[in-house]
Image (tube, grey):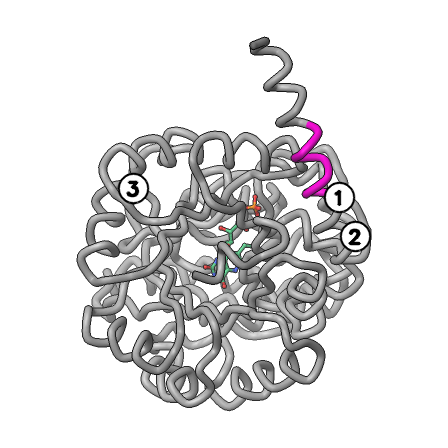
Amino acid sequence: MILSRLQYPIVLAPLAGGPSTPALAAAVSGAGGLGFLAAGYLAAHEVRRNIHAVRYRTSAPFGVNVFVPGSPDVDERAVRAYVERLRAEAARYGTDVGEPRFDDDDWEAKLVVLHEERVPVVSFTFGCPPADVVASLRAAGSEVWATVTDVVEARIGRDAGVDVLVLQGTEAGGHRASFRDRDDGEGLGVLPLIRIVTAEIDLPLVAAGGIGDGAAVAAVLAAGASAAQIGTVFLPAPEAGTHPAHRAALAAERPTALTRAFSGRLARGLVNRFLVEHGSDAPSAYPHVHHATSPIRAAARDRGDADGFNLWAGQAHRLAKELPAAEIVRRLASEARVALEKAAARLGR
Ligand SMILES: Cc1cc2nc3c(=O)[nH]c(=O)nc-3n(C[C@H](O)[C@H](O)[C@H](O)COP(=O)(O)O)c2cc1C
């Protein structure tokens, strides 16, 4: 079990769409945490290249995270209506709306790369692969982790034979990991999720969502998690590929919200103009909407306009500081230790 061999129970969240880099993953693994590469949105050959780049930098274990493909069936009329709405956005940024289409994010080819590269950990989001895929990755030498957002998904992961469950609370930045894009109210926060899953399922748990400092790491460890998976706090690290306008927005006093405006799947980001103007009209249609907004988001990024692209961030984003990734790992660990000692002292003997 990789988790029991880590110096610190700190996992870098996979951060698809730019922030995830081999340098960031290697820095976290090299500092005694567990670095992760995001395979989402990349071609399989790019994933292989990134795996080699991490191995070049460190011999420490790391993970690769893959999107499980969803269903191509969406409400075509709702997608067409949303595309019409996006035309004014495209004109504002001097570009066109992208073609709304389904794809499986190069699923089969990525599985081939992962079987061949035998990375220490393979984690999944947006679903759990069938038991035969889990078994063949394990046979190739990888540990398999499934990301879940409720106890029903946790049971599916357990029954598919995964080694570890990553529990993603609704506080988390980026896409909800749920197996289907669904309206489940606000969704479970990370602490109730840990306790509810622990009561029923006997697997190591990694907790994610809104963990902004070491005291919050201490909280999820005390609640029963084996490690904390942290995303937003690493976005300002110099090793991350985070866009400068996204970095600047993280420090601001802005709320976050769940939205489908950018991708057609619920995700948490900082509230900006695009999210406010389109959030309530965006259909549940991933990755169709992702492809439709792609040129608009790219053009907004090119202009450095933080009001025109997705600024994924968790609820604790105000706590993120620009520090080297290894320093973030060490600080989280030492703060967590202090917080646990203080908490124990409060309880007396
Ligand atoms: C920019 C960004 C990109 C993300 N990309 C992925 C991804 O590719 N795969 C995944 O499983 N989770 C992804 N997530 C979610 C994280 O795995 C994790 O659940 C989340 O970052 C935890 O909450 P926090 O950001 O408050 O720490 C992403 C999150 C962010 C902020």
Relative to 196, 258 lies left or right: right
Residue 336 drawn in magenta: yes
* Distance in Å between CA atoms under marks 3 and 1: 30 Å
Residue 231 drawn in magenta: no
Q: Nearer the viewer, residue 149 or 213?
A: 213
* Label 1 with label 2: CB-CB less than 8 Å: yes
Compared to 131, does 179 lie above or below?
above
Label of residue 327 in the image: 2
Residue 40 shows up from this direction = no
Relative to 116, 55 lies left or right: right
Local packing at callout 2 (Cα closer than 10 Å; few below 14, some 14-19, many 20+) is: some
What SS does tag 2 mark?
helix
Q: Position of residue 70 (x, y in %)?
A: 27, 66
Residue 210 shows up from this direction = yes
Q: Where is residue 210 in the image (x, y as percent from the top left)?
A: 56, 38
Mark 3 and mark 1 lie on one chain; the one further toward the N terminus is 3
Q: Residue at x 24, y 63 (%)?
A: 74
The residue labelled by disc 1 is: 331
Q: Which amino acid does label 1 sit on?
A: Arg
What SS does tag 3 mark?
loop
The residue labelled by disc 3 is: 150
Q: What stretch is highlighted in magenta?
A: 331-338
| Image quadrant assignment for residue 303 | bottom right
State the residue lying farthest toward the front. 349
Mark in the foreground, 3 or 1: 1
